[in-house]
Amino acid sequence: MKSRSYNTRTVAERDVKREWFIVDADGKTLGRMTSKIASVLLGKHKPTFTPNSDCGDYVIVINSAKVRLTGKKMTDRHLVRYTGHPGGQRLTTPKEMIEKNANKLIEHSVKGMLPKSSLGTKMYGKLFVYEGAEHPHTAQKPKELA
């Protein structure tokens, strides 16, 4: 039996060509949109994806206040956070979160889909969420994310 040799290439972070993508959240479903964003931040859309390095791209999200949730999730779902003190569990609904800070809902959703490590923190740093249609990243010439 002949043994096969496969060349598995890993790409170093310094060799990664990063791009900028823009997503308009107006009328898009939260879960479907954020899973696509997380995939781009991870770099899974590239043929050179390496799980142990940060090979993802930058993502800009605009109109975060106009994101939609299906069914009664806007009022019935509870997002949990913990203050760190006894009895410090706090519950909020997506509707309350959008009224207070619309960016937090998308950030919370994407962060939950990224690795829970220092690598995930670096990937999360490439996400920029804005409530309105304006953003300061026009010089990067972002492409529309399909």
Image: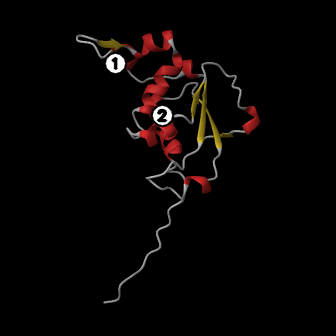
Kind of residue at badge 2:
Thr
Q: Is residue 43 left or right of residue 111?
A: right
Mark 2 vs mark 1, CA separation in Å? 19 Å
Could you say which disc has been placed on residue 106 in the image? none
From the image, which quarter does the C terminus lie in? top right
Q: Name which of mark 2 and mark 1 comes first in the sequence.
A: 2
Say above or below: 39 vs 86: below
Dot 2: within a 10 Å radius of its alpha carbon, few (fewer than 14), some, or many (20 or more) residues?
many
Q: Where residue 61 sits in the image (x, y, percent)? A: 59, 29
Instruction: Spot the residue most to the left.
Output: 86
In the image, 76: left or right of 25? Answer: left
Rendered residue at 32%/13% (across/down):
91
Q: Is residue 3 above or below residue 95?
A: below
Q: Could you tell me which residue is drawn at 42 percent across and 79 percent down?
A: 5
Give the residue at mark 2.
Answer: 34
- 120 and 143: which is toward the camera: 120
Q: Residues within 10 Å of mark 1 (few under 14, many from 20)?
A: few
Q: Position of residue 40 (x, y in %)?
A: 53, 44
Kindly identify the residue that appears in the image at 44 percent across and 23 percent down. Answer: 69
Q: Is residue 132 above or below residue 53?
A: above
Horizontal and vertical percent position of residue 134? 70, 22
Q: Position of residue 58 (x, y in %)?
A: 60, 39
Disc number lying in front (2 or 1):
1
* Helix, strand or loop for disc 2: helix
* Residue 86 found in image quarter: top left
Q: How is the image coloured?
A: secondary structure
Residue 93, can we see it?
A: yes
The residue at which mark 1 appears reads as: 81
